[in-house]
Amino acid sequence: DFFSRTLPHYCRQQIAIINSRCEFLYEKSHFFENSFLVQEGLIDPERFAPMFGMYGLAEAVNLLCENAGLNARYGKNETANELGYRISAQLADFVENTPVKYGWKQRALLHAQSGISSDIGTTPGARLPYGDEPDPITHLQTVAPHHAFYHAGISDILTLDETIKRNPQALVQLCLGAFKAGMREFTANVSGNDLVRVTGYMVRLSDLAKFRAEGSRTNTTWLGEEAARNTRILERQPRVVSHEQQMRFSQ
């Protein structure tokens, strides 16, 4: 029922929203007629593509498994992981085969949303829930199969133990293995570092602590503090890339 009715229904609703918003952008706001970006040839309205975004895959998979009476969790069990891959594949197929009124080649592009700072109880995109992740290699192997479906972007954030600073080659091997497995992009935060990536921006942890006491006029600071409080972004567990787990590549 989820794959035959629920998911297609909400996909169609999202396409309707995309068409409505694009109609406003192209027909009512006259952005593409008046913007100097178009006039100077910096952007082309014919090459714009709306993003069909999704997030909370982990929660969707866990809820579906629970309703089916399965003792399986996303990132912990192959049955749950395969269910997640199936959802991504169906989303990609729908987006690829559904025209939109305005968009490059009359199509939207599938995008794994990183979420916003006010999100509560959901995990960004196809990421594993914060604080419940496995070792780095298993982590990357779990999320990598999703990346081929999200042409408009998908990413992940790992937190590595600070011992990685003394063994940068281990991180190189981790990156090569991730790309070989199909990853398009990921960020490696280092435990103990002050500067960390939140989503599309970076913050200093020391600034978050200062903000709670004194406030701040820097938007990334208060957004980062809200994200840390609501979305558990700082609960990503620091992991060690062990010698026994390293995937070796000659190039």
Image (tube, rainbow, N blue to C red):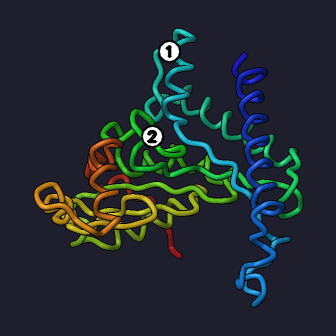
Q: Residue furthest left?
A: 213
Viewer-closest of 232 and 103: 103
175 lies left or right of 196 = right
Viewer-closest of 249 and 130: 130
Q: Position of residue 146 (x, y in %)?
A: 61, 47
* Quadrant of residue 15 within the rendered picture: top right
Q: Position of residue 168 (x, y in %)?
A: 31, 73
Secondary structure under tag 1 reads: helix
Looking at the image, which residue is at 78% across and 21% down? Answer: 4
Which residue position is annotated with label 1?
66
Vertical order, 59 against 194 (above or below) = above
Q: Position of residue 83 (x, y in %)?
A: 62, 29
The amino acid on which the numbered mark 1 sits, given as a three-letter code, is: Glu
Q: Visible in this render: residue 239?
A: no
First in sequence: mark 2 vs mark 1: 1
Looking at the image, which residue is at 39% across and 49% down? Answer: 117
Pointer 1 local density, CA inside 10 Å: few below 14, some 14–19, many at least 20: few
Looking at the image, which residue is at 41% across and 71% down? Answer: 172
* Quadrant of residue 84 within the rendered picture: top right
- The span from disc 2 to disc 1 (Cα, nearest Å) is 17 Å
Viewer-closest of 132 and 195: 195
The amino acid on which the numbered mark 2 sits, given as a three-letter code, is: Thr
Disc sitting over residue 123 in the figure: 2
Q: Residue furthest top?
A: 69
* Quadrant of residue 35 within the rendered picture: bottom right
